[in-house]
Amino acid sequence: MNIGQNIANFRKEKHITQEQLGEAVGVTNRTVSKWESGVSMPGIDLIPSIAFALGITLDQLFGIDKKENTTDISQIIKETVSSSVKKYLEEYLPDIIEETLDDLLQNYMNSPEPKDGYSLLVISPDKSKVCRFYGQGQIDGPYTFNNKPERYCITIPAQGRNMFISDYDTKEAAAEALKAIFDAYNARYTKIEL
C-alpha cells in the first residue's frame, strides 16, 4: 500500500473531502486526487501537515504498524545473526579445532625426547595446555591474572621457553600441584591432569 492510498483511505474514514484536505495543507483538490491515484506524491514538507489534517500519526500515514514492525525487525535480526553465527561456525570452527589440536600435538611432539625415553604428559585443569614434563618445573609469582591479585603459576620448560600450565590462589596450592607433577613423574605415570 502506498502513501496515496493511505491518504485516500484515511480521508474517507474521517469523512474529509479532497477539497477540505487540499485547503488544510495548501494545495488544490486536483493535487490531492493525483496523490490518491498515484500520479504524483506529496512533497516531504507536506507530509506532517497531511497527517495532522487527517488526525493520524506519521506511522499510520506511511502504513507502519509499530508492533508488527518491531516483531518483524527483531525476527529479521535474530535470523540474520543466527545464520551468520551458524555459517561462521560451520566455516571456521573445524579449522580452529584442528589448529588448536595441531598446536597441542606440536608442543607435545616437538619437545626433545629424554635420554631414557620417558616423559610425563601434563594437562592443564581446563585442558587447554599440554606439555611434556622431564623433571623440571617451577612456581612463579605472585602475578595478577584476570584481575585476581596474588596468583601463583606453574611453568614447565618446553620448546626453549617456560610454558604456563596453571595458576593458583596461594603459593602453597601451586606447590602442592607441582609436587603432584613430580610425584607422578617419579612414579613413571604416562600423564597427569591438574
Image (cartoon, rainbow, N blue to C red):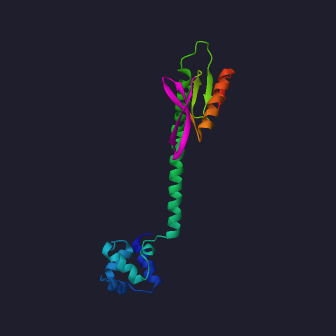
Q: Residue at x 50, y 61 (%)?
A: 73
In the rendered image of this protein, does residue 45 appear above or below residue 117? below
> From this viewpoint, is residue 126 visible?
no
In the rendered image of this protein, does residue 53 appear above or below residue 190? below
Q: Which residues are magenta?
A: 136-164
Looking at the image, the residue that sits furthest to the front is 172
Q: Quadrant of residue 44?
A: bottom left
From the viewer's side, name the closer residue of 75 and 133: 133
> From this viewpoint, is residue 77 visible?
yes
Q: Residue at x 54, y 17 (%)?
A: 112
Q: Quadrant of residue 75?
A: bottom right
> Number of marks in the image?
0
Q: Residue at x 62, y 25 (%)?
A: 121
Q: Position of residue 184 (x, y in %)?
A: 67, 25
Tell me the quadrant of the picture where the N terminus can be found.
Answer: bottom left
Q: Is residue 188 left or right of residue 72?
A: right
From the viewer's side, name the closer residue of 124 and 157: 157
In the rendered image of this protein, does residue 137 appear above or below residue 114? below
Q: Residue at x 54, y 43 (%)?
A: 150
Magenta span main SS: strand
Queried whether the magenta region covers residue 140, the answer comes back as yes
Queried whether the magenta region covers residue 132, the answer comes back as no
Q: Is residue 184 left or right of residue 33?
A: right
From the viewer's side, name the closer residue of 107 and 57: 107
Q: Position of residue 129 (x, y in %)?
A: 57, 32
Q: Position of residue 145 (x, y in %)?
A: 52, 42
